[in-house]
Image (cartoon, rainbow, N blue to C red):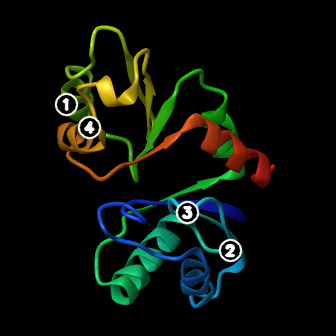
Amino acid sequence: MRYVAFLRAINVGGHVVKMDRLRTLFEELGLAKVETFIASGNVLFDSRAAATTLETRIEKHLRAALGYEVATFLRTGAELAAVGERDVNYVGFLRSEPSASAREKLLALKPPDDDLTVEGREVYWMIRTRISDSPLNNARLEKALGMPMTMRNMNTVRKLAAKLA
């Protein structure tokens, strides 16, 4: 199975990891055909293991190698293709579907001019202003959900989906 790993806290907040080092770390786990895509923590690879098992293994390995937590969110090509069909600017990837109360807390943050929806393990965000002008950010969304999330713009998601097709 071909996967893409969306990694949180790679090359932000002072946590700098060169892409060749990241590839090596994934190869050390026995993952095949490892490649990175832009320097923001997107890693494509092949594995026969289940996504939930891989997420845990990758997180433990990265924690040991890098010295900090790196939340990991895996998607298959089919999952990413479905995400890429959405007409939004950004998507937040979650490990599991949030509870109804977490969704309510998140949606209560929605600015009047934006669209914010949660479907399955994704948070879809359509921003109609500049992101720097929005009162929302990844940290506020995570806090409302009560779980880790990593955000990507849809251009990146669609390019990755094409690579997995």
Q: Which numbered disc flags the more N-terminal residue, 3 or 2?
A: 3
Location of residue 128 in the rendering, given as x and y in whole percent from the top left corner = 43, 15
- Nearer-N-terminus badge (1/3): 3
Query: Nearer the viewer's eye, disc 4 or disc 1?
Result: 4
Gap in Å between the C-alphas at discs 4 and 2?
31 Å
Which label lies toward us, 1 or 3? 3
Q: Which mark is residue 141?
A: 4
Residue underneath mark 1: 101
Mark 1 to mark 2 CA distance (whole Å): 35 Å
Residue at far right of view: 165
SS for dot 4: helix
Question: In the image, which disc is placed on residue 2?
Answer: none
For marks 4 and 3, the one nearer the N-term is: 3
Q: Characterize the local packing of mark 3: few (<14), some (14-19) or many (20 or more) Cα atoms within 10 angstroms.
A: some
The alpha-carbon separation of the residues under discs 4 and 1 comes to 13 Å
Query: Label 3, on which residue?
Result: 39
Q: Which mark is first along the chain, 2 or 4?
A: 2
Q: Position of residue 95 (x, y in %)?
A: 40, 53
The residue shown at (46%, 75%) is: 17
Horizontal side, residue 18 vs residue 130: left or right: right
The vertical placement of 126 against 9, above or below, is above
Classify 10 Å Cα crowding around label 4: few (below 14), some (14-19), many (20 and above). many
Q: Are marks 3 and 2 in contact (CB under 8 Å)?
A: no
Q: Amino acid at mark 4?
A: Leu
Report the front residue among 62 and 121: 62
Placement of 110 over or under 13, stated as above or below: above
Note whether 165 is above or below 100 in the view shown.
below
